């Protein structure tokens, strides 16, 4: 099974893990497709409901939000080839680490909605050639009242829109300001966990805590992918060892974070060679993508899907041993580091930190990473006291959604990403998740909203229409027989509409994808 690349206008939200569903310029950063004046004109007509990407309040700092041509995000504009420079615009955001404003601040739940117009938009969508009959669509107002829909409560295969449920659960459960640290420990002399001893008796342990976006080189403060660099960790470790007079070690690695079961049952049907999702791991370099040379031009913008392995943590340990050697430390078992947990008597020597989880969340949603979606589910399960397994993660997300009062009839999760076949979610559930995110009134929801695709900011083309630029937030989902879309559209009078579409076994895959975008764009123009 292969998925469609978003650059073709058919979003690959599932089956293309680490990067699926972003088109030519929809990375974490750049903007093209609408000039600054167009975006500003669109948004000035309404009390904007803005995601954290465009309005971030810092308790002890200043927000920088620039709608200007050639503004640079992560060091460069990801413009479209041949785009007239006068039509290029982007947003530069200084990330907040403290208080982030949510949509609820601007949401006017009393704003009127043209229900007849919404019904007409839904009726027009239902007349799409090639749509077929196995589809669900719904539009909710700010109070959760259904304005229009078709089979809204029928649970269907949703593909990557599943990730919005996982994101909600993570936002409601985890501290999204925390980081995932990769640590190095020195074995204590009496440690029962030590696998062996080197010639001079020193054993170190490389311990992962969930950072699968490790960089191979020095830590990179300008990107999410590679924020923590393995070369930096090796250099710090070598310095600490040298200070203790140690020049030779044995290397163990601790990959116990996610227990023994690393993949959901049945995922092999859609995940050959781990192309779309690697096994859950305590650590990995660049999502364990095996490049054999090359790599992405922008680490935060995933466009290629080389195969992965079933030993991502071992791969990190092996590379770490090589880097230690470059820093003057001999690793006696460099070719075969031993898997062994950190013991009570072991002492931490040094560490490197990932980007905060709210940025990792944004990366996950923008790039539709199946690997990271599953990891967020596993972290939620651990935090909430559920079984440390894929099934435990799915149950934790399901319970959090249900307990939040979100419509959950027919909800059945096979995983936390939507890649494993058999997941069932109704359009009503997907739309209600969007509504709860916008009205949570908690800063935790902002990273999810930041991660959604924003036409005119993330999306360079498509059929959304310029009226939606900056005021429509969406997540798409795609499998070989599935097209889905969930999101939030602001209205010109300051209110909001929450919507979802799930289509399966359609007659014309491309036409339905275009119809989904046109439907959402028309809602944003109301």
Image: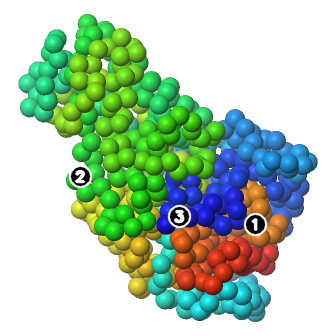
Up-down relation of residue 240 to residue 181 (above or below): above
Instruction: Choose mark 3 or mark 1, whichever is in front.
Output: 3
The spot of residue 423 in percent (x, y) is 41, 75
Q: Residue at x 48, y 82 (%)?
A: 156
Residue 118 appearing in the image: no
Colouring mode (rainbow / by chain / secondary structure / one colour): rainbow
Q: Residue at x 17, y 17 (%)?
A: 198
Q: Name the residue carrying label 3.
A: 2
- Find residue 259 and name its label: 2
* 417 relative position to 328: left or right: right
**Dot 2 lies on which element?**
loop
* 186 relative position to 407: left or right: left
The spot of residue 292 in percent (x, y) is 49, 37
Sequence-earlier tag: 3 or 2:
3
Q: Quadrant of residue 413?
A: bottom left
Circle 1 crowding by C-alpha within 10 Å: few under 14, some 14–19, many from 20: many
What is the CA distance from the residue labelled 3 to the residue labelled 1? Answer: 21 Å
Q: Name the residue carrying label 1.
A: 462
Q: Residue at x 40, y 15 (%)?
A: 326
Instruction: Choose mark 3 or mark 2, whichever is in front.
Output: 3
Sequence-earlier tag: 3 or 1:
3
The spot of residue 59 in percent (x, y) is 59, 44
């Amino acid at each position: 099974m292969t998925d469609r690349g978003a650059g073709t206008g058919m979003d690959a939200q599932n089956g293309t893990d680490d990067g699926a569903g972003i088109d030519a310029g929809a990375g974490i950063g750049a903007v093209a497709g609408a000039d600054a004046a167009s975006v500003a004109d669109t948004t000035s007509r309404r009390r904007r409901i803005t995601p954290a990407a465009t309005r971030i309040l810092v308790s002890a700092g200043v927000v920088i939000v620039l709608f200007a041509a050639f503004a640079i995000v992560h060091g460069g504009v990801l413009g479209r080839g041949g785009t007239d420079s006068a039509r290029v615009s982007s947003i530069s955001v200084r990330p907040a680490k403290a208080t982030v404003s949510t949509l609820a601040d601007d949401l006017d739940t009393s704003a009127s909605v043209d229900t007849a117009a919404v019904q007409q938009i839904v009726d027009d969508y239902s007349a799409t050639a090639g749509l077929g009959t196995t589809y669900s669509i719904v539009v909710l107002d700010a109070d959760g009242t259904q304005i229009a829909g078709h089979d809204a409560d029928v649970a269907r295969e949703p593909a990557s829109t599943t990730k919005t449920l996982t994101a909600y659960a993570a936002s409601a459960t985890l501290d999204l300001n925390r980081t995932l640290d990769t640590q190095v420990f020195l074995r204590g002399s009496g440690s029962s966990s030590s696998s062996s001893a080197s010639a001079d008796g020193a054993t170190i342990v490389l311990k992962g805590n969930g950072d699968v976006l490790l960089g191979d080189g020095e830590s990179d403060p300008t990107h999410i992918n590679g924020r923590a660099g393995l070369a930096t960790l090796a250099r710090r470790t070598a310095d600490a060892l040298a200070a203790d007079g140690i020049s030779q070690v044995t290397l163990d690695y601790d990959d116990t974070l996610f227990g023994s079961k690393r993949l959901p049952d049945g995922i092999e049907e859609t995940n050959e060679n781990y192309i779309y999702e690697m096994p859950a791991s305590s650590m990995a370099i660049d999502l364990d993508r095996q490049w054999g040379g090359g790599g992405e031009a922008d680490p935060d913008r995933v466009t290629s899907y080389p195969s992965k392995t079933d030993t991502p943590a071992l791969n990190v340990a092996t590379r770490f041993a090589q880097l230690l050697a470059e820093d003057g430390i001999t690793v006696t078992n460099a070719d075969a580091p031993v898997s062994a947990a950190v013991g009570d008597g072991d002492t931490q020597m040094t560490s490197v930190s990932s980007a905060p989880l709210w940025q990792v969340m944004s990366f996950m949603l923008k790039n539709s990473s199946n690997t990271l979606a599953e990891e967020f589910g596993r972290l939620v399960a651990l935090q909430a006291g559920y079984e440390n397994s894929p099934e435990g993660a799915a149950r934790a997300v399901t319970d959090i959604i249900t307990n939040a009062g979100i419509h959950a009839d027919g909800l059945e999760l096979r995983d936390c990403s939507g890649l494993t076949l058999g997941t069932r979610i109704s359009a009503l559930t997907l739309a209600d998740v969007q509504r709860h995110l916008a009205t949570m009134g908690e800063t935790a929801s902002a990273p999810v909203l930041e991660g959604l695709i924003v036409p005119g900011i993330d999306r360079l083309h498509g059929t959304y229409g310029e009226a939606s630029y900056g005021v429509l937030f969406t997540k798409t989902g795609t499998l070989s027989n599935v097209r889905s879309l969930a999101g939030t559209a602001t209205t010109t009078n300051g209110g909001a509409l929450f919507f979802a579409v799930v289509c399966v076994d359609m007659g014309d895959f491309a036409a339905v994808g275009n119809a989904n975008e046109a439907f959402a764009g028309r809602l944003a123009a109301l």
